[in-house]
Image (cartoon, rainbow, N blue to C red):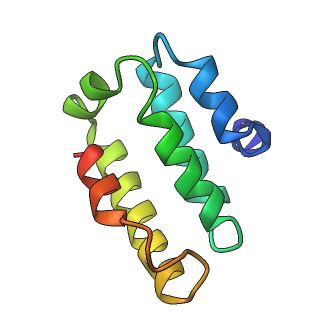
Amino acid sequence: EEFSALVHRIEPSRLQQLFRSSLPAEIFTAILQAIESRYFPEDATRALETLRALTKAGHFTILTMCLERKDETALASIFAQLKTAQEDGLIAASEDLGALRKAYS
């Protein structure tokens, strides 16, 4: 819970800077769990920005190729909640969630 609160306070652009050379798998998993448990529904836009920022992190492609089941489950839940937020007007309809989802698969 404390880590989730910490992640929530970090600006997405700062996450990108912090992990530009490498994002450890354990931190990646913890960030996904934080997004899933803390960001919805009120911070759906921030969840989206955070997911985008993580795609710029070092070793992102390798991380997504080696996802554990809990990461896949968290991502499925996050993208379902993002879709709901988009349908509810909390995220712009112009946001391409499919393209971002593809980056994570």
Up the image or down, 84 lies above or below 34; here it is below
Up the image or down, 43 lies above or below 70; here it is below
Q: Residue furthest front?
A: 94
Residue at 57% x, 86% y is 89
Residue 104 x/y as whole percent: 29, 45
Judging depth in this view, the residue of 37 and 64 nearest the camera is: 64
Residue at 47% x, 19% y is 23
Judging depth in this view, the residue of 88 and 8 nearest the camera is: 88
Residue at 48% x, 45% y is 52
Left of 45 or right of it: where is 67?
left
Quarter-wise, where is residue 7 in the image? top right
Q: Which residue lies furthest to the top in this view?
A: 21
**Total labels drawn:** 0
Up the image or down, 47 lies above or below 41; here it is above
Residue at 77% x, 37% y is 6
Left of 47 or right of it: where is 74?
left
Left of 54 or right of it: where is 98?
left
Residue 46 x/y as whole percent: 65, 56
Residue 103 x/y as whole percent: 28, 45
Q: Residue furthest bottom?
A: 88
Residue 49 x/y as whole percent: 57, 51
Quarter of the figure that contains the N terminus? top right
